Amino acid sequence: MGWCALSCCGLQWVLQTLKRTDMREQLGTQGSGFGDCCASYWCPCCALMQEEKEMVRKSEIVTHAEYQPPQGMMYPPQQ
């Protein structure tokens, strides 16, 4: 609801800036609040794409780091 109200006034970038900053801090991505604000204000579509790609990249890194594939079946040596 807030997004729609701010969009009508041309202020949707405020919420996007806050979300982008939270996500950047959570994922440990470099950047600044000023950069988040500029990206969200000047090109919100690009900023959304960057956020999505960063989230996918970080989740893939975490998934691969924690995932241990099962070892294959081991047969005893034949005599």
Image: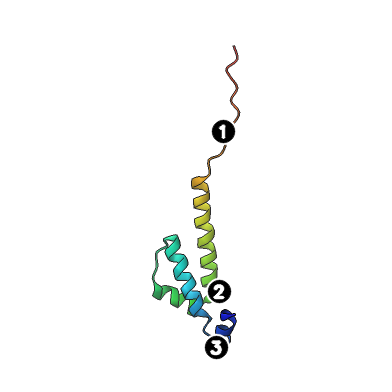
> What's the amino acid at mark 1?
Gln
Question: Is there any visible trace of residue 42 in the rendered image?
Answer: no
Asked if disc 2 and disc 1 are in contact, CB closer than 8 Å, the reply is no
Pinpoint residue 45: horizontal percent, then vertical percent. 55, 74
Identify the residue at the far front of this view.
1
Label 2 amino acid? Cys
Q: Indicate which disc, 2 or 3, sits on the residue closer to the N terminus.
A: 3
Q: Is residue 2 above or below residue 72?
A: below
In the image, which is nearer the foreground, mark 2 or mark 3?
3
For label 1, count other residues whose C-alpha is less than 10 Å away and answer few (under 14), some (14-19) or many (20+).
few
Is there a contact, CB below 8 Å, between mark 2 and mark 3? no
Task: For residue 48, say whether it is visible.
Answer: yes
Q: Residue at x 55, y 68 (%)?
A: 49
Residue annotated with mark 3: 9
Is disc 1 placed on a helix, strand or loop?
loop
What's the mark number on residue 45?
2
